[in-house]
Image (spheres, helix red, strand yellow):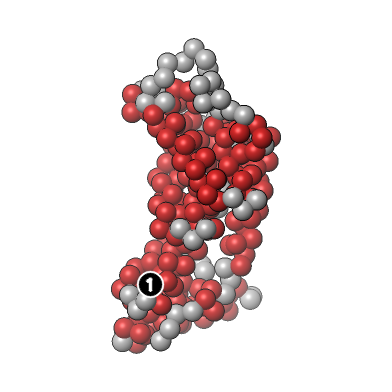
């Protein structure tokens, strides 16, 4: 049985949240694409300006430009993390040599912000594997990022990382199913379900993949669970 995009009922809201997230992030810090373009790489490093400039590019459809800029931000955060505060007197040292936990937490906040937005751009241009990697990296750094005073300025707690990661795993599962790689599809749908137990689409997609493999009992369990979730959503 073929897995199709028709199984993605309910994901339109995730796409809307992605667009809203881009708008929200672009507002943070009052940065513009122009100010990012004028940032001199030889002067103190202000990640929020460069990240928001990349978000502006992404919003205009320049996903390659956004990805390139965000990749450079991430590189600089890792290789010369002491510049994150824009302090001209700060020594340029790699993140691995930073010992102050407050500084590490602030670096993590900027990294989460950058990885999330690069994942958005990657997913928009079809780089689903790269998007999943970036969303997972953002999640891995989240606990540290939330301890930073910058977390509020960057709206870290409001970033819809899991919603986008759910959609990305679901999208990749559909692609694997179309190639009849049903084990890989089931694995991706299961990861999506672990992130959002209350959403039906991944259950429906996993049911189709299980049915295609001959696991009719497993497919029935998923179909029943999807039906329950749909019924509950209309109550």
Up-down: is 204 above or below 80? below
Residue 82 image position (x, y, % from top left): 44, 22
207 to 133, vertically: above or below:
below
Figure quadrant of residue 223 = bottom left
Question: Does residue 57 appear in this view?
Answer: yes
Q: Quadrant of residue 141?
A: top left
Q: Residue furthest top?
A: 89
> What is the number of callouts on the image?
1
Q: Nearer the viewer, residue 219 or 137?
A: 137
Q: Residues within 10 Å of mark 1 (few under 14, many from 20)?
A: many
Q: Nearer the viewer, residue 33 or 215?
A: 33
Residue 149 % position (x, y): 55, 30
Q: Camera-side residue: 231 or 169?
A: 169
Q: Please tell me which residue is depicted at 58% across the width and 28% down the height of the picture.
A: 39
Residue 59 percent across, percent down from the top left: 64, 50
- What residue lies at 55% left-to-right and 51% top-to-bottom? 63
- Quadrant holding the N terminus: bottom left
Does residue 217 appear anywhere in the picture? no
- The image position of residue 118, as x and y in percent, is 50, 47
Q: Is residue 33 left or right of residue 120?
A: right
Which quadrant: the C terminus?
A: bottom right
Residue in view at x 62 percent, y 57 percent: 17
Residue under numbered circle 1: 176
What element does badge 1 sit on?
A: helix
23 up-or-down from 100: above or below: below
Residue drawn at x 68%, y 41% is 27
């Amino acid at each position: 049985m073929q897995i199709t995009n028709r199984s993605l009922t309910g994901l339109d809201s995730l796409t809307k949240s992605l667009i809203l997230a881009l708008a929200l992030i672009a507002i943070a810090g009052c940065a513009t694409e122009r100010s990012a373009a004028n940032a001199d790489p030889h002067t103190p490093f202000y990640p929020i300006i460069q990240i928001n400039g990349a978000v502006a590019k992404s919003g205009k459809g320049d996903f390659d430009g956004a990805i390139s800029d965000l990749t450079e931000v991430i590189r600089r955060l890792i290789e010369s993390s002491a510049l994150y505060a824009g302090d001209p007197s700060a020594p340029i040292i790699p993140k691995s040599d930073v010992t102050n936990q407050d500084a590490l937490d602030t670096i993590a906040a900027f990294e989460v912000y950058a990885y999330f937005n690069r994942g958005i751009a990657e997913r928009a241009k079809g780089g689903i594997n790269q998007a999943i990697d970036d969303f997972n990296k953002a999640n891995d750094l989240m606990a540290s990022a939330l301890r930073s005073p910058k977390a509020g300025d960057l709206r870290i707690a409001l970033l819809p990382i899991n919603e986008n990661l759910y959609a990305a795993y679901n999208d990749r599962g559909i692609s694997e199913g179309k190639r009849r790689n049903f084990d890989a599809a089931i694995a991706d749908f299961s990861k999506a379900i672990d992130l959002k137990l209350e959403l039906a689409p991944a259950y429906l997609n996993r049911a189709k993949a299980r049915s295609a493999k001959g696991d009719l009992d497993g497919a029935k369990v998923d179909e029943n669970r999807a039906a329950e979730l749909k019924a509950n959503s209309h109550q």
